[in-house]
Each structure stands twice: as C-alpha cells, then as structure tokens.
Image: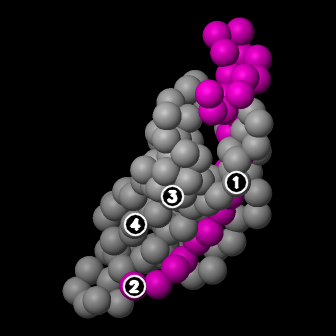
Amino acid sequence: MKSTQELINSSETRISKAIFPNTTNHYNTLFGGTALHMMDEASFICATRFSRKKVVTISTGKIDFEKPIPEGTIIELVVRVYKVGNTSCTVKVDIFMENMYSYQRELSVTGYFKFIAVNKQMKPIPILK
C-alpha cells in the first residue's frame, strides 16, 4: 500500500471550466452557489481518489471569495487533501481565474471540505486501510 503522502500526491485533482452566462449572477460574475457546487464535487472526487472508499461531505470550513470571477474567464479548481483523520479527511479547494486572452492568473476562491468514509450502513469507517 502507498504511504499517506503518496496517496495525497496521487489524489490531487484539477478541473478546468469556462465561465458562461448560465453560471453567472446579475453582476455577470460566477454565482457563489455554483462555485460551491463545483468545489464540493471536485473535493468529493479528490477524497474518493485518496481513500477509494464511499465518502460523504460532513462540513465545510471557511470559504473565502477573494476576487469575483467574471463571465468569459477560465477557472481551474486545484484540489488536494489538506488533513487526514481516522475516519475523515479535509480537502482544500483553490479556484484560480484566468483571462482567456492573456496569461493573467490569480487565486479567486479558497475553501475547505471535510469528508468521512462510510460503510453500507452509512456508519463511519477508517478513511485508510
């Protein structure tokens, strides 16, 4: 079996998306709820790749919306296991925004999502082993 650090490294997840009008609010920026949905989905993928077990979101930590993400930009979600417990792991999600027509890239959103590994009866089990 791989070490915990090897599992963390191999479970890093990156997802890129273009921001189209159907994902924006009345300010023509990415709707916060849509960003949270993307972050939860990407962090679920990372936690599953890390543990290779059934996991469920049990909490979110601080979510910082540092910069608005305008329509017509590209985002990349960079997701990595941040902390490992006995039955849980916390995943950090960073959303980077890129201008489509330049090399400008900046961190826009950061958040933390906590998952627990569960068995068929939805009871917590060790996240690794």
Return the residue at label 4: 76
Q: Which mark is residue 83?
A: 1
Return the residue at label 3: 79
Q: Residues within 10 Å of mark 4 (few under 14, many from 20)?
A: some
State the CA–CA distance, disc 1 to disc 3: 12 Å
- Label pair 1/2, CB-CB below 8 angstroms: no
In the picture shown, does residue 87 fall above or below 6? Answer: above
Secondary structure beneath disc 3? strand
State the CA–CA distance, disc 2 to disc 3: 17 Å
Q: Which residue is depicted at the point 36% across and 80% down?
A: 98
User: Is residue 127 found left or right of 69 in the rendered image?
Assistant: right
Of pointers 4 and 1, the one earlier in the residue sequence: 4
State the CA–CA distance, disc 4 to disc 3: 10 Å
Asked which colour scheme the image uses, the reply is one colour
Q: Is residue 30 magenta?
A: no
The stretch in magenta equals: 105-129
Return the residue at label 2: 105
Secondary structure beneath disc 1? strand
x and y, in percent, of residue 128 in the image: 63, 33
Of pointers 1 and 2, the one earlier in the residue sequence: 1
x and y, in percent, of residue 45 in the image: 48, 41
x and y, in percent, of residue 71 in the image: 38, 73
Q: Amino acid at mark 1?
A: Lys
Q: Which residue is depicted at the point 65% across and 62% down?
A: 111
Of pointers 2 and 3, the one earlier in the residue sequence: 3
Determine the image quadrant of residue 121.
top right
Q: Amino acid at mark 3?
A: Val
Q: Which residue is depicted at the point 28% across and 89% down?
A: 103
Of pointers 4 and 2, the one earlier in the residue sequence: 4
x and y, in percent, of residue 77 in the image: 45, 62
Determine the image quadrant of residue 129.
top right
